[in-house]
Amino acid sequence: MKTKKEITRYLIVTPFIGALDFGIYFLLIHFRLPYSVSKAISYTIANGISYLFSKYWVFKRKRKQATTPEAGRYFIVDVILFGFNIIANQAILCVWPHAVFLAVAAASILTAALSFSCNKFFVFKTSS
């Protein structure tokens, strides 16, 4: 039952985070930043906000439950997913150079699915 609630909350938060990521990404490429740089910046900002939602609402961790190992695990997962997101975005653009929306959407959806699993079973895991 707890996992169903977490998935439901995650599915509510994820489109908001995705829209934030898209918005920042397209704003930055509008100002002619390279796609990969724009994606790196948009992902970092959106992911920071996602961490707060995940920690305090999706997985219901309390402030006193914040631990250095949890932050370390989050950082490790974040770095891996950050690289995955940029590589996925760029790989799609290599195949379809003008499919910017498809690239950012697909990279974000794939990263979100991996993120939930990593956060649930590695970052915010409970000892029970």
Image (cartoon, rainbow, N blue to C red):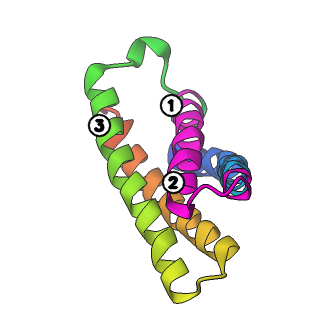
Residue at numbered disc 3: 73
Q: Indicate which disc, 1 or 2, sits on the residue closer to the N terminus.
A: 2
Query: Is residue 125 among what the camera can see?
Result: no
Under circle 2, the secondary element is: helix
Give x and y (percent) for residue 67.
32, 19
Query: Is residue 128 among what the camera can see?
Result: yes
Residue at numbered disc 1: 55
Q: Which residue is drawn at 32% across and 29% down?
A: 70
Q: Residue at x 57, y 65 (%)?
A: 109
Query: Which residue of the protein is positioned furthest toward the bottom in this rendering?
Result: 95
Residue type at mark 2?
Val
- Decide which of 5, 43 is in the foreground and name it: 43
Residue type at mark 1?
Lys
In magenta stretch: residue 62: no
Query: Which residue of the protein is positioned furthest toward the front in this rendering?
Result: 32
Segment colored magenta = 27-56
Label 1 – label 2 distance at C-alpha: 27 Å
Under circle 3, the secondary element is: helix
Mark whose residue sits in front, 3 or 2: 2
Residue type at mark 3?
Arg
Under circle 1, the secondary element is: helix
